[in-house]
Amino acid sequence: MPVLEMQGITKRFGPLLANDQIDLTVEPNEIHALLGENGAGKTTLMKILYGLYQPDAGSILIDNRPVRFRSPASAIAHGIGYVSQHFSLVPTLTVAENIVLGYEGRSLLQRREMEQIVHETAQRFGFNNIPPDALVRDLSVGQQQRVEILKALYRDCRVLILDEPTAVLTPQDAANLFETLLDLRARHLSVIMITHKLEEVMAISQQVTVLRHGRVVGRRRTSETNPTDLANLMVGRSTAAVTRKANHQASTASALNVRDLWLQDRRGVALLRGVSLTVNQGEIVGVAGVAGNGQSELVGVLSGMIAPDRGTVEVRGNALKLGDPRAFNRARVGRIPEDRLKGVVSDLTVAQNLALEQMEDFSRAGHVDYKRIEQHAERLIREFQIKARPGDRARTLSGGNIQKIILARALARDPVVVIAAQPTRGLDIGATEYVHQKLLEQKERGAGVLLVSEDLDELLMLSDRIVVMFKGEITGRLDATTATPETIGLLMAGGQQDRQANAISAQPLSGRDHAGLPT
Amino acid sequence: MLGFRLERSPAPLWVRSLIPLIAVAITFLIVSVLILIAGAHPGEAFYELLINPLTRPTARAEILVKATPLLLTGVAVAFAFAGGYYNIGAEGQLYAGAVAAAWAGTQLHEQPALVAIPVMLVCGFAAGMLWALPPAILRIRLGVDEVVTTLLLNSVMLFFVSALLNGPWRDPISNWPQSPTIAASAQFPQLFARTRIHLGFLVAVLALLAFWWIFTRTRFGLELRAAGLGREAARFMGVRVGRVVLIAALISGGIAGLAGVSEVAGTHYHLIDALSPGYGYTAIIIATLGATTAPGVLMATLFLALVDIGILSASRQLNIPVYLGDIIQACLLLVALATLLLNRYSLRRSQP
Amino acid sequence: MIEFIATVLGATLRISTPILLSGLGETLIERAGILNLGIEGTMLLAAFNGFVVAQTTGSLFAGLAAAMLTGVVLGLLMGFLTVTLGLNQHVSGLGITLLASGLALFSFRLLYGGASTPPSLPESFRVIPILSGTPLGPVLSQYGLTYLALLLVPVLSLAITRTTFGLRLRAVGENPEAADMAGINVYRMRYLALIIGGALIGLGGAFLSLAQLGAFTHGIISGRGWVAIAIVIFGNWQPVKVLAGALLFGGLQALQLRLQAEGVPLPYEALLALPYILTIIALAIAGRNASYPAALLKPYRREG
């Protein structure tokens, strides 16, 4: 008898059909992978299961009894637990307070007793290294994830939902997480894991449900499928093996020269530790790394959004004023931000968003020539195939079209350097290929492209060279033609590169366990 | 199962274009209850409030006199709001301008009007800017929320005015807490014979036109809107957000200061502590109702000024307390805020 | 000298009471993530309603109840606007202040006409004489509401730090998404804070009309609501420090009154303005590190 069934779930957001008649069945003692690309509707479906969204149609059955979740509280009461991608913890409360929050059991809090109960729960499930009295904001990402899982277990969950749980973890931490999940399964819990990583599905799940464009496109027993089959389901056609054009014709003239960047956050934690790199003209350099190892900060510095504590950035030999986006603009650095919503003002029009970066060209003595702004927009809309009119507000556009606006703006003025951060995150296959093609065009043109991505395949396919970041440092520099996902993966996990042999040792850089997980 | 739910998509266009009417209608429905309680007939009361003032030339002129400080403070607040800077301090900045005008106005006895009046306007603008400066700096340099600081500075300014009027500026003859009368040459001339409409109204209209021009035609206006609607994205695109917002905050303070000059030089000719019945706060209503656009601000100002004058005649004729005017303004604000949601959400019948 | 100090201290406690009560109410509301600028108008309408009910029923306690109810109703209105509809908190709050003030003065005029002398209660709350005759008498002999306000400081302090209610309140004010995910009804907690806080704000208003003055006038609140906002920030959203802020304000005011009465030539307004300026300076020093409830001013809404 299945522990959970979702039948015919449909959910619309305005014109977007996020979930279309989705059926999902989860058996007891099962790790069920919910596989799909970004935007396939996985998270929406799980938020419906957790009572955060109300479905437009469809029903949910727990132990064959129909239930209706109007809020997370009712989902929790039926044994659903949810660990979201961006953890939902209150940073200023302690671990224990976060865990009991909402289920305190009595109206007066006994701090000691509360911490004891949390400690016992942690012990019961073999979670060490979680101090109940610590403030959550002082914990590492890995620890915070464990607190989230513990929170669900404290509420006696029977079905645990994990949304992209490995996105923020090193491979080692991910391995530890998987052990935990297998252990939970042995304790008769069911787990639903949202992911778009095939190897994770193959490694840990028993069942897979594949979503595409809000629909179920396949159900498989993991033991009866393979990554190619799943990949085909996920993207909707046969994926050609990753091929790259081996036309490494970069000149030796540097386009971008970054030297010795250092950055600390307000609490004195080092975010960048002496990052240096060079991108030559006509070259794509990929930056690999597990999220949170300094890539965002590097992109921030190279977009002019963050002033580092120390270091220089040169574009074709000219040092730029750091922490000033306009200096990067003027030096013709085309920038694609990590979070595309921070790249456009969503209540301004498409035309205004396309023009704001180069107002010198559209205004005289402070007076704006709106006619030319509109013509400019019309040209870019044609050229980049943006589905919008110049006068549309940016907020009415799809993610893919917003990304195209940013791309058009970044590439419109024949940039010398392109800083592309996660340029295809959340895009469908067509849009992704379009972005790839545009980046390759820039390289052919002679621009130096720095591509920061969490997608290893993307990096391997596009880059000429790849650098790997770990804890704010560049720990590896590889030739993309010879690099393999395995070698990069080891470096991402803190392995060290032996320069002579170009071999990689699996020793972590520091003895300290990165996420404070039990080893 | 039949029910309604909010959906994140704009209501149909015909509904949205009716928003001002819907808001006014709901407000009047609420206010009717109070009119009945006051023992008057709502129909008659609304006639006195909204129609009667428009039929009499003197009342029409009074509406424009009333609109003068409202338009100036309304433009001031709208300027700041559009840049995402919540200047709640227009009231204090108005008094800062008034203090400057009252001071300058008494120093200019020797000067012709062509000198005296511009000097006073400049002094008032500068004083308003100066009073707006500390909260703006705190917000931009240190990230201190401006709502609270501008609000508190209003009280500080009122204490300052009271200290002046009870101390050095107390009228030596009458011993009233009012400043000496400003020079005759510094007093604003009347624009039309037999009305109280003064030069300040012209200043207000010019301020409104400047506001409109800056917002729809200039680079600064576009950058200010970008900064107000999305700080981070604006900065990413090369807008110097801190600078743009600082300038907007200062202009906002300056224009509010002009309202103070206009009240001193155009109506009272000296400084009193009851110079403003809360124009700086009404301005927040105006900027909000006017959606921080120039035509919107103008409409909202004229409507509120009409209500302000109309309530006087309703009070005389029907014995309705004048405070009904405040209630109408407040209701209109809250109802309009709520109905403006129709721009973003719509009620949809949920599917069974 | 001792007598001077004792009377100033006594006056300090008396003057602090209404802003302390309202400030504590505002603290709860802000801890839940709502800046309630409706406080000034709420105090005025509560003072008025309390006065009218006390006068018509002859019961001061009925007056208190009416004042608290006024605060609750206006809190619910604030909740409807900012929690349910998710409207801008500053503008909604100022709108409520304007509305409530308008209603109070409108009704006042209807009921009492243009009387030049303010109507007063035949009997208002009296001070409880404690150790009268001794030097401590002027300090300790206070209204019951003053003692209630002082008692509320530790009570609310403990409620915020040591109870389930306080834990949920803090969670909702710091990270409503997380609180929602943990199964807490964010809307209900915010409404609850507005109800309890509103009642306290109402009490603050009622103290003035039912105890300190025993009468109602237009200027009965005259900015005390804004002072309450200031002391909440000054007090770093902690009841004990809010008390300190209230005493500072009350102390300066009491000193000012006393010195003025003795004819000491001083710019009294400078003393009165001091707490506002200190609050702004405190904010400037704390800067970005000011421990604002992280979700203050942010409406919460699930997308679905």
Image (spheres, rainbow, N blue to C red):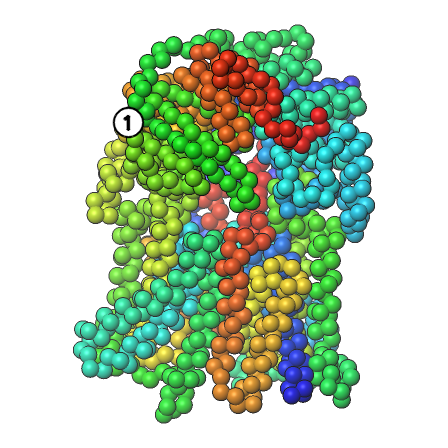
Chain that bears disc 1:
A
In the rendered image, is residue A424 in sight?
A: no
The secondary structure type at the circle numbered 1 is: loop
The residue indicated by pointer 1 is A414
Horizontally, residue A169 falls left or right of residue A275, namely right
Q: Nearer the viewer, residue A417 or A518?
A: A518
The residue lying furthest to the bottom in this view is B173
Q: Is residue C149 above or below residue A182?
A: below
At horizontal 52% and vertical 77% (from top left) the residue drawn is: C271
Q: Amino acid at mark 1?
A: Asp
Residue A17 at x, y = what percent? 52, 26
Quadrant of the drawing holding the N terminus of chain B: top right
Residue at 76 percent of width and 28 percent of height: A158
- Quarter residue A276 falls in: top left
- Can residue B102 be seen at all in this image of the molecule? yes
Q: How many numbered dots are placed on residues in this image? A: 1
Q: Give left or right: position of B273 versus A320.
A: right
**Quadrant in the picture for the C terminus of chain B:** top right
Q: Residue B73, position in %: x, y?
A: 37, 64
Extreme-front residue of the structure: A500
Image height of C241 relative to A184, above or below: below
Q: Position of residue A315 (x, y in %)?
A: 32, 31
* In front of the other: C59 or A500: A500
Q: Nearer the viewer, residue A177 or A471?
A: A471
Residue at screen point 45% across, 68% down: B154
State the image quarter where residue C62 is shown.
Answer: bottom right
The residue located at (58%, 26%) in the rendering is A509
Residue A134 percent coordinates (x, y) = 69, 43
